[in-house]
Amino acid sequence: MLLRKQSTASLQKANFSLCINTLLEGGVVALPTETVYGLASLALDPDAVAKIYRLKGRPSTNPLIVHVLNLEQAMEISYPDTICKLLCRKFWPGPLTLIIPKKKVVPNNVTAGLGTVAIRSPSHPLFRKVLKSTGKPLAAPSANPYSTVSPTSAEEVVNSFGSACPPVLDGGKCKIGLESTVLDLTCETPTILRPGPISRTAVEKVIGRKLANPTEIFKSGIPRKSPGLSDKHYAPETPVRLYPSIKSLLELAPSSSENLIIIPSKEFLPSLDSYSATVMTLSENGDSLEIGRNLYATLKKADLLKKKIVHLSLLEETDGMTEAINDRLRRASCS
């Protein structure tokens, strides 16, 4: 576990060798990415991958994302086509996960037995340092129990797992705070399966064609090409009531003290002056990047308050981040 009295620099230095040795010996460690913290193991070691599933309590039908240093390493485990290579050169390293045909070297428990693999190249310097030091691709879903809120700091990882927590490499608070965009390139028309920081518009501009809307209906027990597609996901312990707009939230949310109201920015605080409910804000002025960066940490703080219900509203979708935020809010509020 982390030694909190050490400086950040010494903490990273002290834990780096331990993390590398743990990975190379078939173990699991928690690593920072620019999106959220991940539970990492050697992607090509099925026994190591199985430890991630057990630690998270993750269904075997939910595949993992494989993290690579670059396109060259991706080509060792998959078959990227021309469009894939174009997207890699534009958006990697960064928060874009691409689903492409896998090579046999990738274990079935990484891909839920499917012939496709989800791959991305993270931009966080510590994760990249680990990839360089191991020289191997790493499987790394979010570092939290299955379906709960993803961690965006090392402290949140430790709090999620307690005494069962694996070694954690502290890379500070995640810069983005929401999981990567997942793009399926094995369909007739490329399809975004999970919205994220890389927008639909940005992808379409690079590939020169429109993306398709997902048509697959996901049923329990059926393998999925991408993580993060469960109806209920990214959910706090406290029930979430979701409103279609901030206007409807301000009009309909209960004012009693047993409720918690989370608003997108401080500009809406005057509307809640008369409320007894506890109020939290996600940003100063409604900036979508700030809201995304703070969303999960705020939901974790909400649980500590032990309120009856958390009240939130969808955002007006203006970019890839607001679409991703709304996707997470819908899944967090699903009963």
Image (tube, helix red, strand yellow):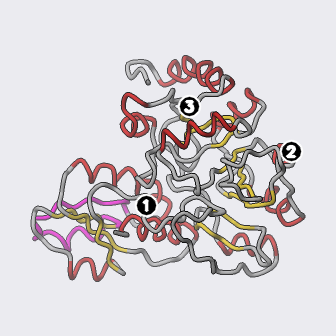
The amino acid type of the residue labelled 2 equals Glu
In the structure shown, which secondary structural element does the residue marked by tag 3 occupy?
A: strand
Highlighted range, magenta: 264-284
The amino acid type of the residue labelled 3 equals Val
Closer to the N terminus: mark 1 or mark 3? 3
Of the 4 image quadrants, the one containing the C terminus is bottom left
Left or right of 39 in this view: 92: right
* x and y, in percent, of residue 246 in the image: 32, 77
Name the residue tied to disc 3. 29
Assess disc 1: are there few (<14), some (14-19) or many (≥20) residues with their C-alpha within 10 Å of its C-alpha: many
- Give the foreground label among 1 and 2: 2
Name the residue tied to disc 1. 291
Name the residue tied to disc 2. 76
Of the 4 image quadrants, the one containing the N terminus is top left
Q: Residue at x 17, y 61 (%)?
A: 308
In the structure shown, which secondary structural element does the residue marked by tag 2 occupy?
A: loop
Q: Residue at x 59, y 57 (%)?
A: 61
Left or right of 238 in this view: 182: right
CA distance for labels 1 and 3: 28 Å
Assess disc 2: are there few (<14), some (14-19) or many (≥20) residues with their C-alpha within 10 Å of its C-alpha: some
- Give the foreground label among 1 and 3: 3
CA distance for labels 3 and 2: 23 Å
Is there a contact, CB below 8 Å, between mark 1 and mark 3? no
The amino acid type of the residue labelled 1 equals Ile
Name the one closer to the observer, 230 or 292: 230
In the structure shown, which secondary structural element does the residue marked by tag 1 occupy?
A: helix
Q: Is residue 278 magenta?
A: yes
* x and y, in percent, of residue 132 in the image: 75, 31
* x and y, in percent, of residue 177 in the image: 50, 52
Up/down of 22 relative to 204, above or below: above
Closer to the N terminus: mark 1 or mark 2? 2
